[in-house]
Image (cartoon, helix red, strand yellow):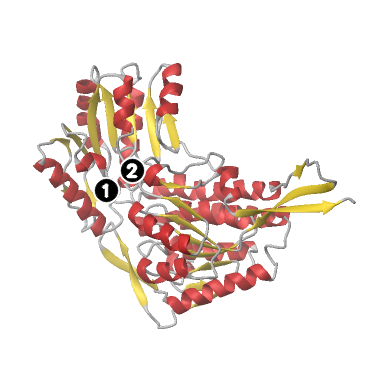
């Protein structure tokens, strides 16, 4: 079976593949070459309505929501097994769609997607209520129940992982789902629809509508049949999502933009720190909400670290994502490449020093940008304060711990942060002061389905992963039985 035979490019509604009601289709572009590789259906409001209705019918008939958590867990374990069985196909598909190196797709994206379903399969049977002691002559207890129909709206940068981080807990809790993947990277969502069905997820429990945010996404967000919205994307769109959901009093989980600070203290192991710093800003070509694009360095080691980066970063392999040796692939779309170019041009206008990179890489017509390190920018520069979402690192010195924390917390974002130090007390002390949903110490991007992540401030609210995520897809009902 070839990649495109296994992803028919149609909408998946009620367990059936179908074209959009108006027959509209849109191109999917290979970012490593800038050329279209296939087309997929472009859903309109009628298609979204059909998907939500299918999800509602599936929820109400109890074929999934009526199962025990253990039974749902068995199905989700089969999903995890099928992901692993189809790992090569999924990795190739994700690499083609997003432009990330195929080795990274296999080691990170596919592996984590399988782990997502496996973890929540195990957690599905642990949704215990609680017996509550009261002075009443009554038996009082609580129940955890599914919310109903969940709208899962996912971004372009980690299509497979971020779909799993929403669908797995939503399904484990007994909900049904309508998934709207990013219009730029829909292929793995369509492939996963087939695997979910093959694993035994009943028809209508998972529906996939491909299309644009302003049309399909907006219709899904505003649909009165949706009971919860799970969204990952930009802060600007997140504000709109929260506003619309708030009008309908729908619960929302939102993981939004980030601009994480990575602090290197003078007592850090610089060799290990540099590896974590580079990983933090080039991982997924910098298209990572929890990336580390702001490097804060103790002044005593600032020149040394800049010199190491100047030598090491140009040696990071950039190229064809199909090449197993590639570490950094292209940007996912031309518009993202242009955004990075605009920020680097702004840095030059502000008198910044381009330590390395700072330009496109002309390769096969793809959307490549050289990993870039920028120094000598003021903290109030837009290049420092705003989310670039590309392989660009700004570097700033600091004089003491208080200044490091103040600089780290100085942006509107609060998704992730990092600390490099050999002082255990300092690691815990600084981690407690940083305004972020997750803090890594002496590494970067250590993620596991058991460890929750999410934002504070403009980076959103609610949590993905862990028991906290599962709880976010349930509602609590109290039952009080009179014993008179």
User: Horizontal and vertical percent for residue 309?
Assistant: 23, 30
Of mark 2 and mark 1, the one earlier in the sequence is 1
The quadrant holding residue 434 is top left
Q: Nearer the viewer, residue 169 or 462?
A: 462
- Secondary structure category for the residue under label 1: loop
Label 1 near label 2: C-beta < 8 Å? yes
The residue depicted at 38 percent of the width and 54 percent of the height is 233
- Secondary structure category for the residue under label 2: loop
Q: Nearer the viewer, residue 119 or 351?
A: 351
Q: In the rendered image, is residue 14 in sight?
A: no
Q: Alpha-carbon neighbours of circle 1 within 10 Å: few (<14), some, or many (≥20)?
A: many
User: Horizontal and vertical percent for residue 365?
Assistant: 20, 59
Q: Nearer the viewer, residue 31 or 397?
A: 397
User: Horizontal and vertical percent for residue 217?
Assistant: 41, 67
Identify whether 81 is placed above or below 64: above
User: Horizontal and vertical percent for residue 238?
Assistant: 39, 55
Identify whether 42 is placed above or below 435: below
Q: In the rendered image, is residue 220 in sight?
A: yes
Looking at the rendered structure, which numbered label has been put on residue 325? 2
Looking at the rendered structure, which numbered label has been put on residue 207? none
Q: Alpha-carbon neighbours of circle 2 within 10 Å: few (<14), some, or many (≥20)?
A: some
Image depth: mark 2 or mark 1 in front: 1
- Write down the residue under mark 1: 319
User: Across the whole image, how many numbered discs are drawn on residues?
Assistant: 2
């Amino acid at each position: 079976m070839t990649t495109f035979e296994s992803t028919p490019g149609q909408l998946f509604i009620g367990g059936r593949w179908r074209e959009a009601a108006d027959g509209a289709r849109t191109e999917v572009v290979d970012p490593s070459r800038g050329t279209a590789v296939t087309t997929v259906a472009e859903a309109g409001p009628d298609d979204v309505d059909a998907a939500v209705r299918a999800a509602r019918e599936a929820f109400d008939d109890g074929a999934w929501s009526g199962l025990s958590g253990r039974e749902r867990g068995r199905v989700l374990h089969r999903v995890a097994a099928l992901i692993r069985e189809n790992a090569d196909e999924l990795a190739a598909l994700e690499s083609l769609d997003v432009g990330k190196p195929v080795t990274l797709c296999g080691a990170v994206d596919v592996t984590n997607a399988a782990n997502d379903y496996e973890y929540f399969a195990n957690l599905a049977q642990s949704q215990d209520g609680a017996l509550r002691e009261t002075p009443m002559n009554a038996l009082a207890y609580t129940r955890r129940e599914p919310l109903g129909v969940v709208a899962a709206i996912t971004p372009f940068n980690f299509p497979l992982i971020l779909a799993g981080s929403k669908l797995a807990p939503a399904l484990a809790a007994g909900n049904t789902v309508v998934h709207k993947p990013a219009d730029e990277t829909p292929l793995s969502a369509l492939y996963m629809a087939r695997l979910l069905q093959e694993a035994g997820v009943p028809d209508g429990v998972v529906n996939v509508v491909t299309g644009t945010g302003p049309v399909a996404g907006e219709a899904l967000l505003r649909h009165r049949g949706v009971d919860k919205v799970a969204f990952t994307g930009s802060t600007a769109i997140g504000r709109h999502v929260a506003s619309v959901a708030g009008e309908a009093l729908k619960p929302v989980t939102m993981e939004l933009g980030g601009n994480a600070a990575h602090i290197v203290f003078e007592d850090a192991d610089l060799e290990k720190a540099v590896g974590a710093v580079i990983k933090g800003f080039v991982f997924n070509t910098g298209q990572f909400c929890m990336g580390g694009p702001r490097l804060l360095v103790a002044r005593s080691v600032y020149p040394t670290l800049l010199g190491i980066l100047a030598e090491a970063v140009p040696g990071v392999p950039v190229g064809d994502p199909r090449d197993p040796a590639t570490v950094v692939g292209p940007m996912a779309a031309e518009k993202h490449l242009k955004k990075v170019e605009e920020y680097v041009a702004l840095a030059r206008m502000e008198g910044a020093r381009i330590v390395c990179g700072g330009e496109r890489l002309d390769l096969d017509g793809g959307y490549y940008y050289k990993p870039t390190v920028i120094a000598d920018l003021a903290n109030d520069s837009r290049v420092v304060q705003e989310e670039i979402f590309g392989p660009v690192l700004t570097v700033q010195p600091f004089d003491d711990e208080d200044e490091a924390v103040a600089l780290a917390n100085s942006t509107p974002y609060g998704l992730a942060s990092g600390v490099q130090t050999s002082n255990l007390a300092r690691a815990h002390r600084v981690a407690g002061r940083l305004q972020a949903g997750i803090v890594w110490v002496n590494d970067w991007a250590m993620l596991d389905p058991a460890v929750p992540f999410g934002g504070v401030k403009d980076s959103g609210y609610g949590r993905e992963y862990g028991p906290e995520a599962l709880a976010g897809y349930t509602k609590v009902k109290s039952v009080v039985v009179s014993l008179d």
